[in-house]
Image: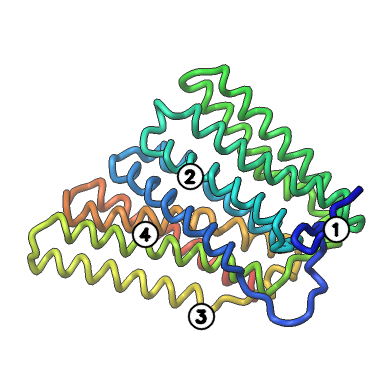
Amino acid sequence: MAITHPGWQRPRLRLLDTGERRATWLELLYDLVFVVAVAELAGLLGEHDLTGFLGLFVPVWWAWAGYVFYANRFDTDDLSHRLLVGAQLLAVVLMAAALGDPVNRSALFAVAYVAVRLLLIVAYLRVSRHVPQARRLALSYVTGFSAAAAIWLLSLALTGPARYAAWAVAMVVDLATPLVSRRYQGELPPQSEHLPERFGLFVVIVLGEVVAAIVLGVKGHALTPLTLLIAAAGVAVTVVVWSLYFDRLDGRVVLRTRAAGQIWVYSHLPLAMALVAFGVGVEQLILHPGGYAAALIGAALVVVAATLAAQRKVSR
């Protein structure tokens, strides 16, 4: 017998809801946990571990995005949904804890990431059972995400570069799953006011990481005119990026051609990476001026400019 208690609801399609929809307090708590994970990733970049930063940023961002897309269409904010999110929060905490020592804690990171994905798979299985019009999309996601999770689990039997290669293959499967499910997504377009707000909040998270990195740089260095100039320039760029992103944020882009919407969504991954890299670059420029800091800042600004330009183009 299905549970029908008001505190335990079945998943339901949110696309036809009337009235303005905003991020819930639970979603904001979920984002807060990822603030910690992003800070740990920034630490890797500060230690010159560029490969680790790039490779681990992708699953962290995708773990966040997976929940965002599910909640956009099916969030009920009932007890069952809160238990699901609470379990995911624990798994994300373990992911963040593993980022401090990614080589020796790679198994922990893999298990924690799989836990996040399995909980999402369970959520979509519930959708396939209780929301008939979303069944094909949900089962398509379940198939792709399950295949990727299986590869992550198989990677535990490997060591060294072979394990990381398996992770790369798994992430390709994970990231490609929504792309091969496009024919079903057209039947269930995302909510155009909720989804851009959620992605905008993640941009705020990484912009906050830029400011935090600048603070750490100033804190760890003698206060000189040059230090103040670098810090001021870093804050100025942060404000400019904020303005360029949010002044031109048009939620209707997610309802336009599927290609435009997916370009807009996926472009947030390199944008987030580049913003974190810019913050670390400014910090390094204050503490350890040199080629590494200059290269980080230069590459980051190029990527930020390119992604913002791409988002503007598909939003027209």
Between the residue at mark 3 and the residue at mark 4, the CA separation in whole angstroms equals 20 Å
Three-letter residue code for mark 3 = Asp
Three-letter residue code for mark 1 = Thr
**Mark nearer the N terminus (1 vs 2):** 1
Q: Is residue 229 left or right of residue 118?
A: left
Residue 207 is at least partly visible in this image = yes
SS at mark 1?
Answer: loop
SS at mark 3?
Answer: loop
Between the residue at mark 1 and the residue at mark 2, the CA separation in whole angstroms equals 32 Å
Query: What is the x, y in percent for residue 180?
Result: 77, 46
SS at mark 4?
Answer: helix
Residue pointed to by mark 1: 4
Camera-nearest residue between 240 and 121: 121
Residue positioned 49% across, 62% down in the render:
306
Query: What is the x, y in percent for residue 304?
Result: 44, 62
Q: Residues within 10 Å of mark 2 (few under 14, many from 20)?
A: some
Label pair 3/4, CB-CB below 8 angstroms:
no
Number of numbered discs on residues: 4
Camera-nearest residue between 87 and 209: 87
Residue pointed to by mark 4: 209
Q: Is residue 162 left or right of residue 283?
A: right
Q: Quadrant of the C terminus?
A: bottom right
Residue pointed to by mark 2: 93
Between the residue at mark 4 and the residue at mark 2, the CA separation in whole angstroms equals 18 Å
**Mark nearer the N terminus (4 vs 2):** 2
Which of the colour schemes (rainbow, by chain, secondary structure, one colour) is used? rainbow
Q: Is residue 196 left or right of residue 243?
A: right
